[in-house]
Amino acid sequence: MSHTPLFSAPHAHQATSIRRTMWLVILALLPATVYGLYLFGWPALNLFVVTVASALLAEAFSLRLAGKAVKPFLFDGSALLTGWLLALTLPPWAPWWIGVVGALLAIVIGKQVFGGIGQNLFNPAMVARVALLISFPLEMTTFLTPLPMFSANAPSFVEGLAISFSQGINLDAVSSASLLGHVKTELGQGHLLPDVLTSVYDLKTLLSGNTPGSLGETSALLILVGGLLLLFLRIISWHIPLAMLGTLAMMATFFHWLDPAHYPDAVYHLFSGAAMLGAFFIATDLVTSPVTARGQLLFGAGCGLLVYIIRTWAAYPEGVAFAVLLMNATTPLIDHYLKPRIYGRRRDGSPLQHRNRLSEGGGT
Amino acid sequence: MKLFRIRGGVHPQEHKQLSAHKAIEVMPMPELLRIPLQQHIGSPAVPVVRKGDSVLKGQLLAHAQGMISAPVHAPTSGRIIAIGKHIAPHPSGLPVRTITLKADGNDRWIDLPGPVDPFTLDANEISERVAAAGIVGMGGASFPSAVKLNLGKRFSLHTLVINGAECEPYLTCDDRLMREHATEILDGVRIMMRALGVAHCLFAIESNKAQAHEAISKAAGNHNGIRTVKVPVRYPMGSEKHLVQTLTGEETPARALTADIGVVVHNVATAFAVHEAVRFHLPLISRVVTVSGGAIKHPRNLRVAVGTPVRELLAHCGGFREEPARLLSGGPMMGQPIINTGIPVVKGSNAVLALTAAETATHPAMPCIRCGSCVKACPCGLVPVEISARTRHGDLQGAADLGLMDCISCGSCAYVCPSHLPLVQYFNYAKGELTARQRAEHKQKETKRLAEQRAERIAREKKAKREAMMRRRQAARKRTKSEKAGANV
Ligand code: SF4
Ligand code: SF4
């Protein structure tokens, strides 16, 4: 009975592939990316190109080394997406080598060491981001007020090259803390929230993204648009984003209600930092999140909770990367314990009760 | 009527418009018919004719054997020219014992008894007639129908469900049958209700077949007890257990029959065959087959004699428009590839499809990206991604623990997988392997038990022999003693 037919059913297939999935995610990221590049000008574009190119090179190199076919894997879009996401989470004027080191960390350590696409336990872009943050805290926390391309004070193309590729440019003149960082510092110095916020916090700015922050994280609105597109195309399901943002909002609302002078409200948390990008594009990474709906709800809620805890009580102003990595580690466990109920069985796996038998007889 | 949601499922492109408007056409009788003795689940039929015999149309060629089996009859008049192995559309792909009949062109019937009124017959008489006509489930499963009509003896039943879902893409044979033979089908339905002793029937038709629905509703008229129900278009709506759940909200327990929740499901084509068999004594010797797909020149619905080679169907439909990427027996979701067009149409064949490369949309497999699409698509609540990982690592027991044996091989998971993994192939392989292992284990245990029994028996016999010997010796000793004593006296 070892006969295997030439082809096995099904003989039709949905119009889907890894490549299509990855490219649609990239498409969804496009609005926020273009806007981020516009906001932060030439140096940001340089960093972006360097990061993405390094990711692709690192992927090709690793594939060659592992003796795998380079073409199908390189063009599946996954390395491109990893590099892209990483670039979006970097400070926009970071030097070129941050992008290169980050891409290498993401692709080689974050992905290929585990065996390539589908095998990694942790989100590669977040592995790189956290490693960079710990190794190069200065470069990774130097943010600046947006200087939109072609605006009066924006660096020209040549100046941009200088910022990205040579040292010696003093960023102190333009640098400015991100909102999360600023609030954290001020609160740490004993200032009260209402005083701290009036100067910097304004919902319209947060929505528009015209605020200091990572390259592609600042416009919560455009990210939301992209995220909704992914939901609409069924590339991701609503479970992780809703659970993550919902938990974050609930935590924020609760503590804000307890003590408005020290704990910012939900809107502040949802629309600042990497919360939106994290909820729609990072935590939902297919490979590293649970496969079942209930698992995804738990995973999302865990991410939201950890983001709030880290932002509020830990040493770092932003916690999305840490939160996602921590929850990634629980994915195998979640997948093991939270399985759907099998048809015709109870949750514990025993069959449902027979009811209409006249006499005991064999089932089939 | 309130319907209930089932989990998972997919919406494959329907492609039914290729043949849905084509009325059923009787295909000319071929010269040579290959009639497999096993066209059903269960034991193969046993031939009652010999090479060289002349037979008439409808004459019994082979009788059923055992509890679960079905007889086969001559689809036309002619001469038996061979009885031997021949390729057949069997899931194993192996040749099956087959009777080859050379048609004489007269298509002469045997004498049939006059029609009877089925409603004067009792349940046993009805199922006997259904069994004698060789009727099997015509939706593809090919389970002997009479066995299913007898379920009333073991279960307390309340509803007959007629499966007119026809959820596989391309297939239109049931649709056409419902449109063109609604009255006959409904007669068959009432006969089956009588046999099962149920007062209710739900006649389920997917909502994409408005005309069939209308025809059946009209034919059902105001016969209370029969209700036509439009069910949502979603694959695998035609899966028995899922159809019953959609209609009644009740879930059949694992490893049990729908009869366990009081329901029996039959296919529309089966109902038609029951009508012909019980009312007119006609055996099941032909069926409607959809010939379709983008590579077929003239897609059609044909009434074909059982045993007609697929090659003839293709030729009758004008051959290929282009070289097909896949040639299939059955629908694209669960059908079997046809490797040789010499294989015959059998009682369970509902379609012959020739699909183009664009239609099959297959790509080389990539690694699993754990996207969870398969989990969402599975109508059985399984986690195909985990089961396939275990099968690929050879951990069959692990796969079984995750519910491998509850998989109905519907293909929904593989259909949506962005990595194009042949999930169903893994599962079918693993299921076969597990069953074989269990069988081997059982055999091993059996052998061990027999060996132990034998050893025990031998030991027992030895012991008995020894004891007998001892007794004899003792007796002899006693005898000599007493003889001596006697001598001394
Ligand atoms: S659909 Fe395919 S790629 Fe996605 S989890 Fe299932 S097996 Fe893996
Ligand atoms: S083939 Fe099996 S595992 Fe896949 S969707 Fe169907 S029942 Fe689920």
Image: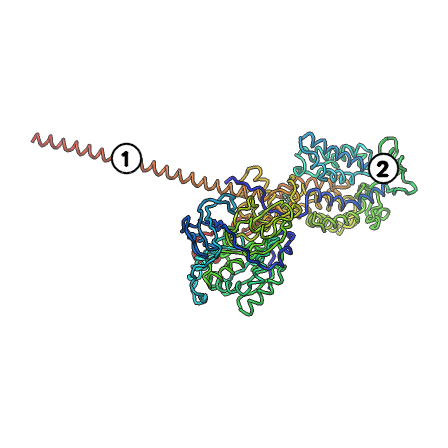
Count of numbered marks: 2
Tell me the residue that label 1 is attached to: B463
Q: Residues within 10 Å of mark 1 (few under 14, many from 20)?
A: few
Marks 2 & 1 on one chain: no
Q: Quadrant of ligand 1?
A: top right
Residue B159: x and y in percent read 51, 62
Q: Residue placed farthest to the left in the image?
A: B489
Please, which chain is the residue tagged with disc 2 on? Answer: A
Picture quarter with the C terminus of chain B: top left
Residue A143 position by quadrant: top right
Find out whether the residues at labels 2 and 1 contact each other: C-beta distance under 8 Å: no
What's the amino acid at mark 1?
Answer: Lys
Please, which chain is the residue tagged with disc 1 on? Answer: B
Is B358 positioned to the left or the right of B348 in the image? right
Residue A253: x and y in percent read 74, 51
Residue B122: x and y in percent read 42, 64
Relative to A275, residue B208 above or below: below
Relative to B195, residue A97 above or below: above
Q: From where the camera sits, is residue A263 visible? A: no
Picture quarter with the N terminus of chain B: bottom right
Residue at image point 61% right, 58% down: B22
